[in-house]
Image (tube, helix red, strand yellow):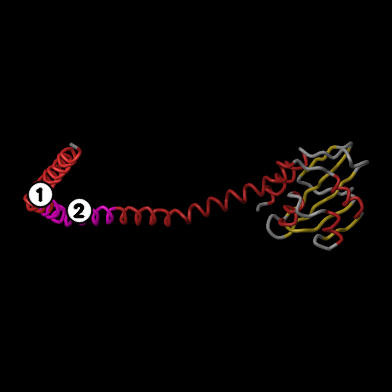
């Protein structure tokens, strides 16, 4: 992260901030080492905060830290009081004035800008790395679908003679069964006629006996 980007981020965060809880005048200089090396100052006056890319000689305190700590302070992941107390950042001057910066309310949008950018970057990276996998999956799925269609066609092709054989066998069986069915039906008619004949004879006998 360059010095210009660091200053721009802090400037954007504090220009939209609510510093009304900070009474009096506060001027803190930030000296960044390592990546983004340089100095800038944060000033609060009349409840308003401002950030400029210069040194501030009539300052209340000077903070020494790297770009990562600045980002953490702006993103709300680290408080000034805790950072100074734990020596996470170096401090020369009035530490109580530095702690007043924790009273400044940064807008959520400003705090979340870095997190959103980082999330989008990660998401884009994941998508980029996942693209070959997705293409491979699609290609594999198409191959599987094509193979399934091929197998289906082959099964249907092999099943066709079986279907025809079953139909032919059914027809032959029905044809062979036809005489048997007719014989059974004829026998049934004979039995029926015989039964009716016997019933009629019994009725006649009863009538004769009564007379």
Of tags 2 and 1, the one toward the viewer is 1
Q: Name the residue at 80% across, 40% down.
A: 50
- Is 60 colored magenta in this rendering? no
Compare residues 127 and 87 and report the one nearer the observer: 127
Percent position (x, y) of residue 12? 72, 41
Q: CA distance from mark 2 to mark 1?
A: 45 Å
Give whichever of 135, 35 is nearer the camera. Answer: 135
The secondary element bearing badge 2 is classed as helix
Q: Is residue 198 above or below residue 65?
A: above
22 displayed left or right of 5: right
Q: What are the residue bounds of the magenta stretch?
A: 146-169
The quarter holding residue 205 reads top left
Q: Which mark sits nearer the N-terminus, 2 or 1? A: 2
Could you tell me which secondary element the residue under label 1 belongs to? helix
Residue 106 place in picture, x, y as percent: 78, 43
The residue that appears at 15% across and 56% down in the rendered structure is 162
Residue 44 placement (x, y as % from top left): 86, 41
* Residue at figure coordinates x 71%, y 56% from the top left: 67
Check whether the beta carbons of the residues at disc 2 and disc 1 lie within 8 A of each other.
no
Residue on which the image places disc 2: 156
Residue highlighted by disc 1: 187
Which quarter of the rendered picture does the C terminus lie within? Answer: top left
- Residue placed at 81% from the left, 60% from the top? 89
Q: Main secondary structure of the magenta part?
A: helix
Between 145 and 11, the one lying in front of the other is: 145
Quick check: 8 above or below 142?
Answer: above
- Verify whether residue 168 appears in magenta: yes
């Amino acid at each position: 992260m360059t010095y210009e980007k660091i200053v721009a981020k802090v400037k954007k965060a504090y220009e939209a901030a609510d510093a009304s809880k900070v009474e009096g005048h506060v001027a803190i200089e930030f000296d960044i080492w390592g990546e983004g090396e340089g100095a800038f100052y944060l000033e609060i006056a009349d409840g308003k905060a401002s950030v400029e890319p210069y040194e501030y000689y009539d300052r209340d305190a000077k903070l020494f830290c790297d770009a990562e700590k600045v980002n953490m302070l702006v993103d709300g992941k680290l408080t000034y009081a805790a950072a100074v107390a734990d020596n996470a950042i170096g401090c020369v001057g009035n530490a109580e004035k530095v702690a007043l910066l924790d009273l400044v309310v940064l807008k959520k949008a400003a705090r979340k800008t870095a997190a959103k950018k980082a999330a989008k970057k990660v998401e884009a990276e994941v998508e980029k790395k996942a693209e070959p996998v997705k293409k491979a999956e699609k290609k594999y799925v198409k191959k599987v679908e094509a193979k399934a269609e091929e197998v289906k066609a082959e099964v249907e092709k092999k099943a066709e003679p079986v279907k025809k054989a079953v139909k032919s066998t059914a027809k032959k069986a029905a044809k062979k069964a036809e005489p048997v069915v007719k014989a059974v039906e004829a026998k049934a008619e004979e039995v029926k006629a015989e039964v009716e004949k016997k019933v009629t004879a019994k009725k006649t006998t009863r009538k004769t006996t009564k007379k």
